[in-house]
Amino acid sequence: MRFKWLKKRFTFMVIPDANSHVVRFRLSGWALSLMTLSVVLLASLAVTFYIIQSRSLGTNQLLENKLVGVTEQFEQTVTEKNTTIEQLQNDLVRLSQQADQVKDKIEELKKLESEMKSLTGMNGDKPVSISSASPGSSSSSHMGGGYTPATDSDIRGLIEDTEHHFDDLDKEIDGLFGTLSETKKQVEEMQQLLAITPNIWPVDSRNVSSGFGVRIDPFNYSPSFHNGIDIAGRTNDPVFVTADGTVTATGYDKSEGNHIVVDHGNGLHTHYMHLNEILVKKGDKVKKGEQIGKVGSTGRSTGPHLHYGVLKNGAVIDPRPYLKASRKDEP
Ligand SMILES: [Zn+2]
């Protein structure tokens, strides 16, 4: 029979050492084969388990490696983003400082405009001072102190402040444009007015030999009205026109001698008399300070001098109070 040995019995002997008892046990063929089968089965199970375990371990390792890679990449991205944020924050701080600098410059411009106004004597409105002098506004480069990193809320505050600063600057600049062009217009008007206002001395001499008003006549020694001022000088000293204008008359008569009349517009005329020589003719456009003649003693005169007269709307006025500027000082 094929399975004959299954019915047989097998004896196993265990001999520990020479002095100990021999242990014997008997097993039937069935039991033996069952045991063998169990051992084989257990071994297979162990092998299968080992294979599964090691495969799973491999997968885990792979996943772990992947995770490490992804984490590293993520960390790198975060680092890059942080660097970018830091750069942006630095840019923001610089931008905010620039806003402050521009603000300072606008303030200077306003002062300059105000000075310009006061120079031309139109000191109407004082410049509006920018109220808040921001901490960064002093342009000193000497700085110090401990380092405390700016918080997110600091940065948000700075962004808002900077936005407001730039909004304010925009308005300030617009306002300044308006006032500056207004000032420019006023300065131009002032210049124009100044150009046609007879306010310079008509000769270099300051020796007023006879004033405006009632005086004793130098020829008949009785009271008379002197309708201008006499400035004593030397023959052929240059005579300058005291404002921009047009020559309306030149000529000679017994009383005025060689004389010139200049129309300055706005109802103003100036008269230059007793000239030794006339250098302009009727219709000439003349510029303030330009030489129009030479000092002489022609006509009713006792010696070389210039009779200078000013008419306002046809009436003679005292020219003296207007003779404020020297020809070289002011236009
Ligand atoms: Zn006179």
Image (cartoon, rainbow, N blue to C red):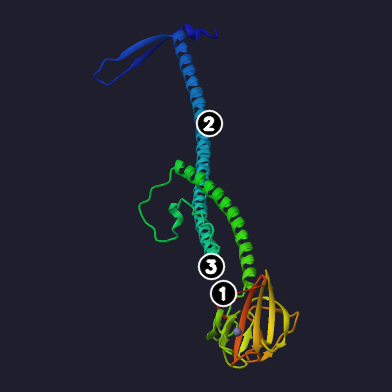
Nearer the observer: mark 2 or 1; the answer is 1
Which residue is identified by label 2? Answer: 59
Q: Which residue is mark 3?
A: 119
Q: Residues within 10 Å of mark 1 (few under 14, many from 20)?
A: few
At a point 55% along the width and 79% down the height, the residue shown is: 214
One can see residue 84 in this view:
no
Q: Residue furthest top?
A: 7
Q: Give the camera-side residue of 122 and 248.
A: 248
Q: Report x, y in % for residue 17.
A: 27, 21
Lower position in the chain sequence, tag 3 or tag 2: 2
Q: Which mark is residue 26?
A: none
Q: Which residue is under mark 1?
A: 322
Q: Label 1: state its secondary structure.
A: helix
Would residue 43 appear left or right of 301 to someone viewing this image? Answer: left
- The amino acid beneath tag 1 is Tyr
CB within 8 Å, label 1 to label 3 = no
Q: Quadrant of ligand 1?
A: bottom right
Image side of residue 141 versus residue 206, left or right: left
Residue 94 versus residue 152 in the image, above or below: below
